[in-house]
Image (cartoon, helix red, strand yellow):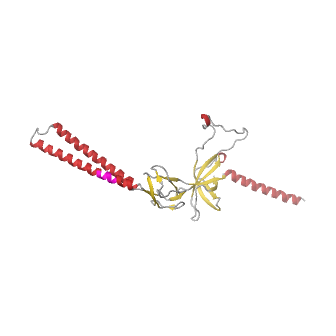
Amino acid sequence: MIKRYFITLLFVLGAGFVVNHYYQVFTENPWTRDGQVSAYIISVTPRVTGQVTNVYVDDNTRLKKGDLMFQIDASVYQAALNKAIAAEKQARAAVNKAINEETRATRLEKRTPGAVSVLSLNNLDNAVESAQANLELAKANVESAQLNLQYTKVYAPTDGFITNFDLRVGSQVVANNPVVALIDENSFWIEGYFKETELKGVDAGDQAYVTLLTHDDTTLEGTVKSIGYGISKTDGSTGIDLLPTVNPNFQWIRLAQRIPVKIQLSQVPDDLQLRVGMTASVKIIK
């Protein structure tokens, strides 16, 4: 009987030791299932307005930096360039004319002093400066027209993935209005949301382990890159009739806020594709 009690006591002590060990590991090394994959999303924005004439990519495709994505009708901008070039030629001709007139008057004044008044010479000199300024303006207009013509072709600004792409030939795009979301292929990280009570002693550079919900058999290694310095609060925000919004709460319960912790992965297997929004579990080793 004593032996049986002794064995039972050993089992209880062993179970208690295991529970205590895992409790210590959990409290010393914070863990959360509230994590997700994040990446920088570039809003591809056309720099000119016009109708889309060609689309060279499809939804959910991978692009390399410099790949042509779509093209905007260039006819209007080609016409503007031709007009600017013609205006530059006119301005150049005006400069030559002003210089010739000034040169002729200057030579005449040298041969016959007093033949040309000082006021006339000053006016001719000012005419040359004005014509040269108009020429510089015309050159700038040509450069601007050339840029607008180049902007009718929209290229991928970085390596990445297109998603939720619905641009079609015939669509009208407006300058400085985003039309395509491009996920930067080289910017993926893991965002883990930890209780504020678990972050004591956590610092940038600490080792972290990440497990994705879709690949629970693979553990990814990483390091803590940074810890968020603030989160949005609900209480005190402006609500209806410009009055502050205050949520009711229980005085005897204090819920810990969750602070975002950014995890930079050390290496991702070639057969594992990260996707923005995927669910992840994160454990930090302090």
| Residue 164, image x, y percentages | 55, 56
Q: Is residue 137 visible?
A: yes
Left or right: 147 as drawn, with respect to 224 = left
> Would you say residue 185 is visible in this rendering?
no
Query: As drawn, is 98 to the left or to the right of 164?
Result: left
State the residue at coordinates (15%, 45%): 104
Percent x, y of residue 225: 56, 52
The residue nearer to you, when weighing 66 against 13, is 66
Query: Which quadrant holds the N terminus?
Result: bottom right
Query: Magenta stretch: dominant SS?
Result: helix
Kindly give the residue lying farthest to the front in the view shown: 170
Q: Is residue 4 left or right of residue 249?
A: right
Residue extending farthest right: 1
Of all residues, the one furthest to the left in this rendering is 112
Residue at 23 percent across and 47 percent down: it is 95
Taking the magenta stretch, the answer to whether it contains residue 180 is no
Question: Where is residue 181 drawn, in percent x and y?
Answer: 52, 54
Is 85 colored magenta in this rendering?
yes
11 lies left or right of 206: right
> What is the magenta range?
81-86
Q: Where residue 218 sits: x, y (%)?
A: 63, 62
- The foreground one among 40 and 48 is 48
Number of marks: 0
**Quadrant location of residue 150?**
bottom left
- Residue placed farthest to the bottom in the image? 271
Q: Is residue 63 above or below residue 261?
A: below
- Foreground pick, 143 / 275: 143
For image coordinates 87% across by 60% down, the residue present is: 4
